[in-house]
Image (cartoon, rainbow, N blue to C red):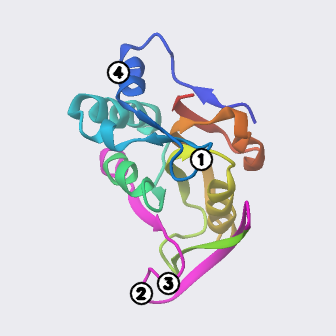
Amino acid sequence: MAAQIVDSTDDRISRISSSIRVIPDFPKPGIMFQDITTLLLDPKAFKDTIDLFVERYKDQNINVVAGIEARGFIFGPPIALAIGAKFVPMRKPKKLPGEVISEEYSLEYGTDKMEMHVGAVKAGERALVVDDLIATGGTLSAAIRLLERVGVDVVECACVIELPELKGRDRLGDKPLFVLVS
């Protein structure tokens, strides 16, 4: 599904984009790492980021914001609070106490798992899945599958950054993707 991108004439987008630092060859040669820690150091750009997501989702009857570990934990909670939804952490294996449900997904070399607490969501709830960046789409697609397995309606995925050359949105099936910076 084609990504939906916020209006590029909105001056908040240029502020957000310019606050993201790109670090070449991190964590390995050939990778251009998109560092959002510099965005977090700029209170106006960080607020603009949250505000743009809240403006989009405040009237969509979303009652679950599922944040993907770890940077989805930065953006998800303030969005959830602002729209009156609960925040559900989607974590790496063995990070959540108690009973969990998990979903395996493929990495470039091997597999990984994503987990959430059993009972954190209910069938029929409407969810937004949040992460800082979509690259290959593996973690977002795993989060969608995990939520849908328990009957949740995943309304949309939202990311601050998209790396379109990696075609991650293709792995999301028919789920819309909303990004701020591409």
Q: Is residue 75 magenta?
A: no
The residue that mark 2 highlights is 97
Answer above or below: position of 41 versus 96. Answer: above
The residue that mark 4 highlights is 15
Name the secondary structure under disc 1: loop
Q: Earlier in the sequence, mark 4 or mark 2?
A: 4
3 or 2: mark nearer the eye: 3
Hey, what amino acid is under mark 3?
Lys
Name the secondary structure under disc 2: loop
- For the residues labelled 3 and 1, say whether their Cβ atoms are less than 8 Å apart: no
Q: Earlier in the sequence, mark 1 or mark 4?
A: 4
Q: Earlier in the sequence, mark 3 or mark 4?
A: 4
Q: Earlier in the sequence, mark 3 or mark 1?
A: 1
Cα distance in 3D space between marks 4 and 2: 39 Å
Tell whether 135 sits left or right of 179.
Answer: right
Residue located at (57% from left, 25% from top): 5
Hey, what amino acid is under mark 4?
Arg
Cα distance in 3D space between marks 3 and 2: 8 Å
Hey, what amino acid is under mark 1?
Pro
Hey, what amino acid is under mark 2?
Pro
The residue that mark 3 highlights is 94
Q: Earlier in the sequence, mark 2 or mark 1?
A: 1
Cα distance in 3D space between marks 3 and 4: 37 Å
4 or 2: mark nearer the eye: 4
- The stretch of residues the image draws in magenta is 80-109
Q: Residue 3, percent across and down? A: 66, 31
Q: List the single residue furthest toward the front.
A: 29
